[in-house]
Image (tube, rainbow, N blue to C red):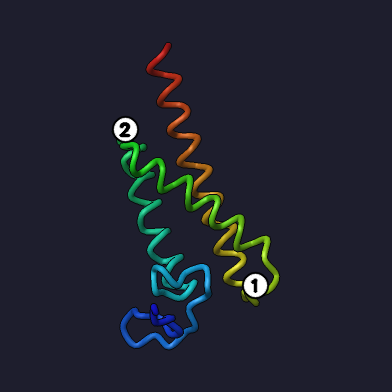
Amino acid sequence: MALQVRACQIDACSERVPQTLTQQGVCLGHYLDEAFTRVSGALELCRRGQPLDSAVLDWLLEQGDFAVRLLSRDDLMQSSEQRSRLLELLLCLANVQEYVRRHAVSKTS
């Protein structure tokens, strides 16, 4: 039987780990911090004209789906700040998608 993680595993954080993040073992705040870091890295690669590999693209799509699922659930009791950060993450993901689309179009032109 697996032990359910109840508190974030990052440093001395004592925030509750939502059920949707038990596999990662982090609270929503730390999940978002990591997601923003990774999305920023992907955006930087795009700005330099470097292609994103399929693993990164798959991860980006998963994060968009995950953020939408979190936003659609009322039972998670997200603060307005957390909801704002989730919306900001979606915007960042959309920006990466636009860069990828433009890069693909410019290659075919």
Q: Residue furthest right?
A: 74
Identify which residue, 46 or 66, lies in the foreground: 66
Q: Label 2: few (<14), some or many (≥20) within 10 Å?
A: some
Disc 2 marks a residue whose amino acid type is Pro
Q: Is residue 62 left or right of residue 71?
A: left
Residue 99 vertical placement versus 5 (above, below): above
Of the 4 image quadrants, the one containing the N terminus is bottom left
Q: Label 1: few (<14), some or many (≥20) within 10 Å?
A: few
Disc 1 marks a residue whose amino acid type is Ser
* Label located before the other in sequence (2 or 1): 2
Q: Residue furthest top?
A: 109
x and y percent of residue 15 in the render?
Answer: 47, 84
Residue 36 badge: none
Tag 2–tag 1 contact (CB < 8 Å):
no
Residue 70 vertical placement versus 105 (above, below): below
Disc tally is 2
Identify which residue, 36 or 9, lies in the foreground: 9
x and y percent of residue 84 in the render?
Answer: 60, 64
x and y percent of residue 101 in the render?
Answer: 47, 29
Residue 109 vertical placement versus 93 (above, below): above
**Which residue bears the numbered disc 2?**
51
Residue shown at the point (48%, 53%) measured from the top left? 63
The picture quadrant where one finds residue 72 is: bottom right
Of the 4 image quadrants, the one containing the C terminus is top left
Whole-angstrom CA distance, mark 2 to mark 1, is 35 Å
**Which residue bears the numbered disc 1?**
80
Residue 106 vertical placement versus 99 (above, below): above
x and y percent of residue 68 in the render?
Answer: 61, 55
Residue shown at the point (53%, 43%) measured from the top left? 94
